[in-house]
Amino acid sequence: MQSRIMSTAPPPGNPPSNNEQKPEDTGPSASISAEAAMDVTPDGPPEETWDDIPEDIMALNTEEISTRTRLIDNDIKVCFEDI
């Protein structure tokens, strides 16, 4: 047989309703949301243009560009093998 111990205190009631609105929070969380609203960092990388490509590279044909790309890739592989 189990015995149950019951409290003699009445159960907590609902808090009295307050029809007034709470004042706006001015704590740390309010300042964080203001900082987030003022975020001015760019959304993505800058737009790419052809202006930064040297003229001698622009004059190359497709085969010459592919050859240079392979040579650069091989140089990178050799550099990482030494590490």
Image (cartoon, rainbow, N blue to C red):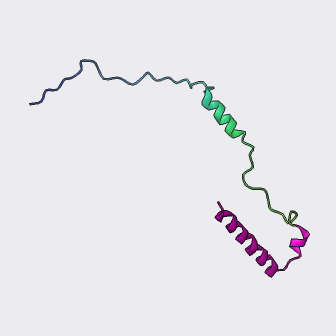
Main SS type for the magenta part?
helix
Which residue in the rendered view is the most extreme toward the left? Answer: 1
Q: What's drawn in magenta, residue-wise? A: 54-82
Q: Is residue 44 above or below residue 35?
A: below
Q: Position of residue 45 (x, y in %)?
A: 75, 56
Q: Is residue 35 above or below residue 43?
A: above
Front residue of this view, candidates 35 and 46: 46
Which residue is rendered at x = 89% and y = 76% of the image? 59
Quadrant assignment for the N terminus:
top left
Which residue in the rendered view is the most extreme toward the right? Answer: 55
Q: Position of residue 75 (x, y in %)?
A: 73, 68
For the question of whether residue 24 can be seen, the reply is no
Residue 80 located within the stretch drawn in magenta: yes
Q: Is residue 10 above or below residue 77?
A: above
Front residue of this view, candidates 41 and 26: 41
| Horizontal arrangement in the rendering, residue 34 relative to residue 17 (left or right) | right
Residue 7 located within the stretch drawn in magenta: no
**Quadrant in which residue 36 is drawn:** top right
For the question of whether residue 68 can be seen, the reply is yes
